[in-house]
Structure formats: structure tokens, C-alpha cells
Amino acid sequence: MSHTRANILLLFASFIWGTAFVSQAMGMDNIGPFTFSFSRTFLGFLIVLPIAIFYEKTLIIVLKNKQLLIISVITGSVFFVGMNLQQYALLKSQVANASFLTTLYVPIVAIISRFFFKSKIYWITWFAVLLCIYGSYLLTSNQSSEIKMYDTLLFLSGVFFAIHIILIDVFMKKFYSPFSFASIQYFIVVIFSFFIAILFETPTISKIKLEWIEILYCGVLSTGISYTIQIIAQSKANPAPAAIILSMEAVFAAIAGWIIMGQTLDNFKIIGCICIFLGVILVQIIPVYSKNKSI
């Protein structure tokens, strides 16, 4: 696969993930956030599981290896918290806020890696963090206290997504089996989300059917197909362009929220989005270029 084709596939995945924020927001008219998370992840699980079984043939190995299984369960649990914090916040938060505040996981990963794994951190990272903080302030300041609370949940979801990314890296270094790993994670999310939905929501098949378009879009395209595309294409793409393309997810989400849901952004929010986007890009591409120069 050429770099150009890989970049096109990543752009498609980024577009799906961005527009999926709209489906997440619109898919809770008749069901609760945990029911939605259960439904979409169950569809994603049904797509990824056959790939893990027939192409990797390592799922049984992971399940029998105690260390790998523990990492998988912990990662799935963290993924469950991050996903549902985001989903719950979308009850009130704007799509643009959800997408851009969630992308804060990128600089958070760099900071966590520095203090817990002694990874090298570039000076530009601290500038990027300040840029993201300022952007977050502009994005959330001119809102009611209730909406600010929901936006805070989005920031927390970004923290959990950052931990999720780090745990994925830990697993992959021990055993490269992405689809088997994803299957276990999705299963954990399905079980936990269903349990919480039964306790606090009233999920029924008839209500879930009313949101079938949004669930199908998120479950099949976002959770199942786009995840597969990322794994295949990212290994063939150049790291710096790939980072920029994947970060476009937030931009696509903001545009989709405006076109489909009529959610407009004032000047402060637009500047805030730009600051966060630039901060995220700097964190990802500067280390890549620095490594290339040192080679």
C-alpha cells in the first residue's frame, strides 16, 4: 500500500470518527448514554471478533495468558469509563466541545509518559499544553455552570483515553494482536455498559430500534470498520502526516455539528478550537521531525 492510499484511508477513518460525534449526540433521544454505548460497542464487537478469530488466531492465547488478560481487562475498563464519560457529556455539551476537549488526550499522554515512564518530552510539549489549556478556557468559559460541568466530564474522558492509549502501547509491546485485544476491550465495555444501563436506564429493544441509524453508524463504521482501517493504514503511512490527518477528527466533528445540528461557534470558541488543534498537532509532529533529523 502506498503512502498516498494509506493517508486517504486514514482521512476516511478520521471523517467517520468526527461525524460519529453527531450520531452520538443525536442517538440519545429515546435511550440513555449507557444503552447507546452498549449498543454501538456490541456491533463493533461483532465485527472485530471474527477478524480476531480467523486472521490473528491469537484470542485463545491472550485469554490463557494471565498477564495479557489482566492488561486487556484493565484497558477495557478504562476504555469503558472514557467512552461513557464522553457519551454522557454529549447530553448537554456541543459536538465541537466534545471533539476538541477529547483530543486533549494527546498532550496528556505525553505528560503521563514523562512522569510515569520517564519518556523523553520535548520543550514544545509544554508550549502545546499551555496552548491547549488556553483553548479549553475559550471553548468552555462563555457557558452556563451546568454546561461547564458536562465539559469537565469531557476533559476527564480525555484523561481516561490517554491512559487507554498508554495501556494499548504496553500490551502491543508484549504481544502484537490488535484485533484480539480490541475484542476483549469491546466485550468489557458491552458488559459494563449493559449492567449500568439496566440499573439506571430502561433499555428496551423497541427504544433501541428508534436510534438504529445512529447506533449503526457508530457501531459499524466508527467502532468496527474505522478501527480496522486505522490499524492497516497507519502502519503504511508516514507518522507526521498520519498524526495531522487523524487529528482532523475534531475539525470534521465541529463542521458536522454545525451543518447537521445547527450548532454554531462564537469567535471565542473558534479561537479555542484552533488553539487546541495547533497544540495537539505540535505534540505529535515535532518529536517525529526531531527524530528524523537525529538519524
Image (cartoon, rainbow, N blue to C red):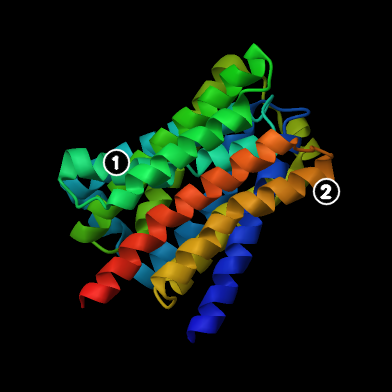
> Can you say which quadrant of the picture contains the C terminus?
bottom left
Examine the rendering and report whether any part of residue 189 can be seen. Answer: no
> Front-most of 70 and 244?
244
Please provide percent x and percent y for residue 234.
44, 70
Kind of element beneath mark 2: helix
Residue at numbered disc 2: 259
Q: Specify the amino acid type for callout 2.
A: Ile
**Extreme top residue here?**
145
Displayed quadrant of residue 15: bottom right
Displayed quadrant of residue 209: top right
Please provide percent x and percent y for residue 172.
26, 58
Which residue appears at 56% of the width and 61% of the height?
226
Q: Specify the amino acid type for callout 1.
A: Ile
Q: How many marks?
A: 2
Q: CA distance from mark 1 to mark 2?
A: 35 Å
Left/right of residue 196 with respect to residue 110 in the rendered view: right
Left/right of residue 85 with respect to residue 111 in the rendered view: right
Q: Residues within 10 Å of mark 1 (few under 14, many from 20)?
A: many
Picture layout, residue 33 above or below residue 177: above
Q: Earlier in the sequence, mark 1 or mark 2?
A: 1
Left/right of residue 123 with respect to residue 102 in the rendered view: left
Picture layout, residue 234 above or below residue 64: below
> Front-most of 3 and 50?
3
Kind of element beneath mark 1: helix
Which residue appears at 22% of the width and 49% of the height?
68
Please provide percent x and percent y for residue 215.
69, 44
Examine the rendering and report whether any part of residue 45 can be seen. Answer: yes
Please provide percent x and percent y for residue 285.
40, 62
Residue at numbered disc 1: 111
Q: Of discs 1 and 2, which sits in the foreground?
A: 1
Which residue appears at 42% of the width and 52% of the height?
183
Which residue appears at 30% of the width and 37% of the height?
74
